[in-house]
Amino acid sequence: MSSKNQTVLITGASSGIGLETAKIFSSQGWNVIATMRNPIGIGTSVPNILCLPLDVTRIDTIEAAITAAIEKFGAIDVLINNAGYALIGAFEACTSEEIERQFATNVFGLMAVTRAILPHFRGRRQGIIVNVASIGGKMTFPLYSPYHATKWAVEGFSESLQYELRQFNIKVKIIEPGPIKTDFYNRSMSVATKPELTDYKNYVSKVLPQMQQPDVGSPPEVTAKVIYRAATDNSWKLRYPAGGNAGFLLTLRALLPDAIFHNIIRAGVER
C-alpha cells in the first residue's frame, strides 16, 4: 500500500506501542489520527499527526473522532485498535466492576470502534483493521485471567470477522506482541486486591514479581514496525507475532502437549 494520501486512525496512542506506531506511520508520510482519552498534543512534536479525544468506552467520542478524521483527510484507510490495559491479580479478588471495565475497554471498546468505521470501509470497498491482541490471546500466565479472557475474545472476534469482510475487500489483521518494554507494567495495569482475602497472598507475592519485569522483552517500536508491516504488506495474512520471542513462544504452545507447556510456565513464574 502506497503511503500517498493514506490515513491511519490509532486508538490508545498516548504512549507505548500506540505512540511508536503513530511515529512510524508519520515518518512514512501517512496522515495520522492519534487518538486517546485525554489528548496530550504529541502532534506538536511529531509532524503530520492530528490528536483527537477518543474513549473506546464512549460511542459519542468514537463517532466524533471518525467524523473529524474524515472531514480533515477525506478518508480513513487503516484502523489500528490498540487501546487496552491489564487487570491482574487473583481472579477471586477481582470485583464484577473491575472485570466489566476490563472487557469494556479491551473487547467491547475495540468492537465499538470497528463497528463505527465499517460503514466507511464498506462504502469505499476497502480498508484494513489491525487489532492489537497479545500472545496472551493464545497462551496464558497466572494472575492474568480477566486480561487473557479479553485477548482470547479479540482473537476469536478477529478471526471470524475476516471471513465476512473479505467480500468488501476489508482486511483484518491480528498483532500478537510478546513481552514489551513499556509503561504497561505501571500505567496500563490495574491490580485487583481484596485485603480480607489472604489465601492467595503467598502465591501472588511469589509470582507477581516474575510477571512484572519492565526490562524484559522488546522495545515498543519493534511491535510498531510489525503493525506497519501488517498494514502495508498487501496480503490477507491474519496473524503477526511481534517481538519478545512471541513467535517462538506461540510455536511452543502450538506444538507441545498442554501438560508439558504448563509445566514450563509454572517453572518460569513460580520459582
Image: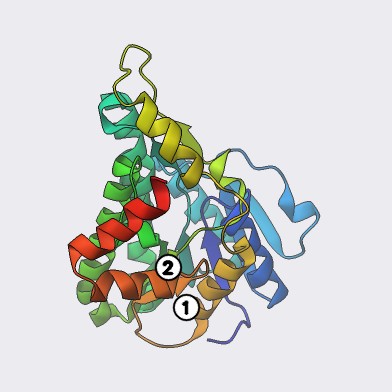
Which residue shows up at 47% across the image and 46% down it? Answer: 211
Q: Are marks 1 and 2 in contact (CB under 8 Å)?
A: yes
- In this rendering, does residue 10 appear at all? yes
**First reached walking from the N terminus: tag 1 or tag 2:** 2
Query: To which residue does mark 1 refer?
Result: 230
| Residue 241 screen position, x and y as percent | 43, 72
In front here: 236 or 128?
236
Q: Is residue 168 left or right of residue 195?
A: left
Which residue shows up at 61% across the image and 38% down it? Answer: 38
In front here: 251 or 263?
263
In front here: 95 or 53?
95
- In this rendering, does residue 111 appear at all? no
Q: Is residue 158 left or right of residue 164?
A: right
| Residue 106 screen position, x and y as percent | 37, 47
State the CA–CA distance, disc 1 to disc 2.
8 Å
> On the image, which quarter does residue 18 sit in?
bottom right
Amino acid type, label 1: Ala
> On the image, which quarter does residue 47 sit in?
bottom right
Amino acid type, label 2: Ile
Residue 246 numbered mark, or none: none
Q: Secondary structure at mark 2?
A: strand
Q: Secondary structure at mark 1?
A: helix
Q: Residue furthest top?
A: 196
Query: To which residue does mark 2 refer?
Result: 175
